[in-house]
Amino acid sequence: MKLAFCSVCLHKHPFEQMLSIASHAGYKDLELIAIPTWIHVDLNKLSPSALEKTVSGHGMKLIALYPGGVDTKSDETIAKSLKYIQSTISAASELGVSRIVFTGNTREEPLDAAIEAYQSLVPYLQAANVTLCLENHYRNQIEFPEDYEAIFKAIDSPNIGMTIDTGHFTSSQVDIPALIDRFAERVRHVHLKDHIGTQSVMIGKGRTDNPGILKRLHQKGYAGYISLELEVADYENSEAYIAEAKSLIEGYIAKAES
């Protein structure tokens, strides 16, 4: 397993400042939030070559893109979301990035509409050799093991997998080791967070058993990225937390693999 940095940790920082801070903290691999209405880049406005040049200029390498999910409020929003996700898949292919990551909408919106949209992405994913790693999120369309069961039952494709967000599963009171046992073959990416209830806190300060989770992942053969995420209430301490988390998580990985 290998540590990566997710740019959501510095969601209030501009793109290049985020890169500079992450790089100086020692992170080399980057999961980049690329949601046009939020952070950090709009892939409609930045070419893959320009993006790669900027990231590599800070000594980092892209390992995942997060374009935002499928907005299932209407046929129009679905179509708009899919168009951007398709362009992200193309950009990922050009950049040599093998995974894109996103989650669902609110729990009140029907999962069936999202599943139909995910299914429509499979030919694009296959052609680009890119995997969609669907992330769980508290009070979201994708929150519980049963949601993943429905998705994987409907879409039997190796290009549709799972991102485990350890913090959000803590919030949703999901038995994470049991979930890993159940879906081990579909786990393609991991967001490592620590939570107290629904609040993200500094790694090691919450109730999420991240060392135990990484141990179970290793036992089940997972050898992919562990992407740090911090969405703490005391955002002013984020830079210090990011630096501290690196050695802490690398220690978790080393112990899990020993």
Image: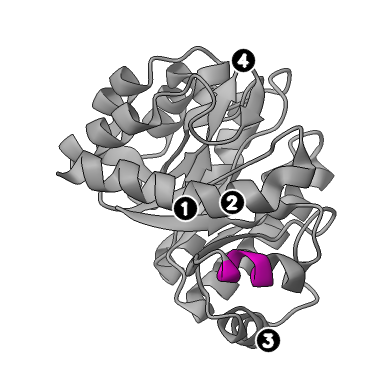
- Residue marked by disc 2: 242
Q: Whole-Å distance between the Cαs marked 1 and 3?
A: 28 Å
Label 2: few (<14), some (14–19) or many (≥20) C-alpha neighbours in 10 Å: many
- Residue marked by disc 4: 197
- Is 94 displayed left or right of 220 in the figure? right
Circle nearer the N terminus (1, 3): 3
- Residue marked by disc 1: 246
The secondary structure that dominates the magenta segment is: helix
Q: Whole-Å distance between the Cαs marked 1 and 4?
A: 23 Å
Q: Residue at x 75, y 69 (%)?
A: 17
- Residue marked by disc 3: 50
Magenta extent: 19-24
- Magenta region includes residue 20: yes
Q: Amino acid at mark 1?
A: Lys
In the image, residue 79 sits, relative to residue 74, either above or below, namely: below
Q: Amino acid at mark 3?
A: Ala
